[in-house]
Image (cartoon, rainbow, N blue to C red):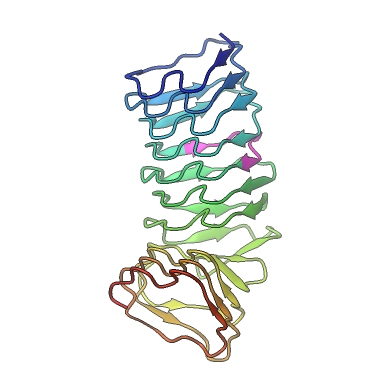
Amino acid sequence: VSFIGQYAFFDTCLKEIIFENNSNIFNIEKYAFAKCLNLIEIVLPKSLQELGSSVFEKSGLVKVEFESGFSLSYIPQNAFLGTKVENISLPDSIILIKNNAFRDNMNLQSIQFGKNEIMIMDNAFYNTGLVNVYIGENITYIGEYAFVGLKNLTSFEVDKNNLYYSDIDGALYNKSGTKIISYPAGKPGDIVLPDSLEEIGYGAFENTIGTKILFNKNGNLNSIGFRAFYGAQNLTEIMIPKTIVEIDYYAFANCQKL
């Protein structure tokens, strides 16, 4: 067997997949194992050259490993969306994590990236259970919502040698500190923002349990992005600085206590 077609085992009672040593499987197409609720673990063979979108979407996967010598360069769109994968260590070959790759996986506690330069696309880890996120110097791009809505996260850590991103008080910023990309939603207390801040990114404070936003009166914040504070359950008050020129759609939607 060298090819598994789209929807081949979709929504079946399949419990186990074993790829023999020196497997010739080169392509597993989209939705091939999606909604296989009894499928708990898999070792992806090094022979893979293509992997389709949503290939394991909403399956029962808890454990995913990669055979030594794995060379595929990407994790496809929606690949592990809604699964139960708890921890994952990506091989060095992975340089692209596509949209929604691990989205809505509340069991996911940790992710270890490889050593090569990596791009992380929109929503890749949105609404997951990550308890720690380390952005190494090899992370070159983080898309919108990639690390948003992380209710179990209390702090981001960014390698000081990263050329594109930084951490300030445990939150994820661009390198210059002018844009906040994501605030750890599980961090309690007042939220103090730096003087350098000019832009609040899409969903930056979504699901935060913080209670109050403190802007510097002499700061230069001018933009509050789409869904910036969406679902901020404990937010009771916010003073909009006079420098603000734009508040995007749904910026404070579902803030029940505001």
Q: Is residue 65 above or below residue 113?
A: above
Residue at the far front: name it.
249
Q: Is residue 258 above or below residue 39?
A: below
Residue 85, picture quadrant: top left
Q: Is residue 91 magenta?
A: yes
Q: Is residue 3 left or right of residue 192?
A: right
Q: Is residue 49 above or below residue 117?
A: above
Residue 76, picture quadrant: top right
Q: Where does the image place residue 175, in percent across and percent down from the top left? A: 66, 66
Q: Nearer the viewer, residue 117 or 233?
A: 233
The quadrant of the picture occupied by the C terminus is: bottom left
Q: Where does the image place residue 153, in percent across and percent down from the top left? A: 41, 57
Q: Nearer the viewer, residue 117 or 73?
A: 73
Q: Where does the image place residue 98, in percent across and percent down from the top left? A: 58, 42
**Residue drawn 52% across the image and 70% down it:** 225
**Residue drawn 59% across the image and 49% down it:** 121
Boundaries of the magenta span = 88-96
Q: Where does the image place residue 44, in percent across and percent down from the top left? A: 53, 23
Q: Nearer the viewer, residue 240 or 193?
A: 240
The quadrant of the picture occupied by the N terminus is: top right
Helix, strand or loop: magenta stretch: loop
**Residue drawn 51% across the image and 78% down it:** 193
